Amino acid sequence: MNTKTCLITGATSGIGKAVALALAKKGQEIVLIGRNEEKSVRVCEEIKRKAQNGNVSYYVCDISVLQDVCGLAARIKEDFGGIDVLINNAGARFLKHQLTKEGIEMTLATNHLGHFALTLSLIGLLNKSGFSRVVNVSSGAHYGGTGVIDNIQSASDYDGRKQYANSKLANVLFTYGIADRLGGGGVAVNSCEPGGVATNFARNNGFLSWLKHRVYYLRKK
C-alpha cells in the first residue's frame, strides 16, 4: 500500500484516535482534526511515538462551526495537493438543546453540517488523488430517524435522541447523495456503523445517566 494522505475529524479521542493510530502504524500520512490545540499536540506526538511515524500533523477546527470549517478547508487546500482518505468521524449527542455561535443546533451542526461543508469543499483535492475514499461514520441510531430535521434553532419540543437519530440518518443520505453526484468516478463514498464502542462520546451530555435509569427501569419491570 503506497503512502496515502488520510484526514480524520474528531481524531484526538475515541474511534478517530484509534483509526489514526492504526493507519499511522501502516505508514500512512495522518492529518488529525481536533477542537483543542493542547490536546491535538499531545495526541499528535503520542501517535508519532507509538507508530514510529513522524508524518503526523494536525489542524485545530470546531467542526460544528461552519466558518471554522471553511477556514480549515482553505488551509488544507494550501498545504496539500491531494487527499486520499477523508474520514468524517467527529460526532456528538446533546440531550439538552444547545446552539453553536452561528445559531445552529449543536448535534446537527457537529454530526452533519460541518462534514457536509468540509467534504464538498475538498472534492477537488479528493479527485486529484486518482482513487480516494470518503468514510462517513454514522450509527445504527439512524434507523430511528424520520429524514426530516425541522428543529434547527428552536428549543421548543427538542428531543436530543430524535435529533441524534436524524443527524445520523443525514450522514447516510448524504453518503448516497454525494456518491450519486460523483457518478462512480475516482472517489468512493461509504458510511459505516461502528457499533457500541467504549469511548467518552456520551459522558458529558447526560446520555449515560439516562441510559442507567432506563436499564434500571427495564430490570424492575
Image (cartoon, helix red, strand yellow):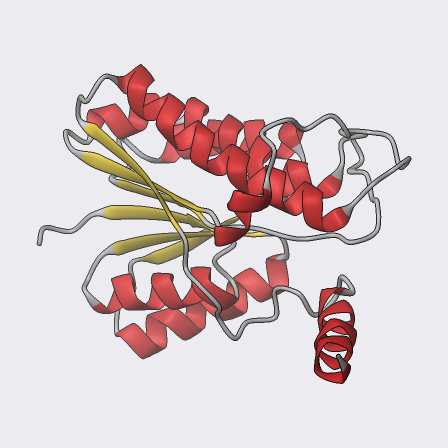
- Which residue is pictured at 63% across the width and 34% down the height? 68
Give left or right: position of 102 versus 21: right
- Which residue is pictured at 47% across the width and 50% down the height? 89
Q: How many numbered marks does the figure carry?
A: 0
Foreground: 49 or 9? Answer: 9
Give residue 98's quadrant in the image: top right
Residue 172 in the image, given as x and y percentages of width and height: 44, 36
Quadrant for the N terminus, please. Answer: bottom left
Is residue 15 positioned above or below 168 on the image? below
Residue 130 in the image, given as x and y percentages of width and height: 14, 29
Foreground: 36 or 114? Answer: 114
Which residue reaches farthest right? 156
Give residue 190's quadrant in the image: top left
Residue 185 in the image, given as x and y percentages of width and height: 17, 21
Foreground: 89 or 51? Answer: 89
- Which residue is pictured at 76% across the width and 36% down the height? 105
Which residue reaches farthest left? 1
Is residue 160 positioned above or below 126 on the image? below
Q: Is residue 158 visible?
A: yes
Give left or right: position of 57 versus 39: left
- Which residue is pictured at 27% across the width and 61% down the height? 23
Q: Is residue 63 visible?
A: no
Residue 216 in the image, given as x and y percentages of width and height: 75, 81
Foreground: 219 or 175? Answer: 219
Quadrant for the C terminus, please. Answer: bottom right
Give left or right: position of 132 versus 146: left
Is residue 47 positioned above or below 33 on the image? below
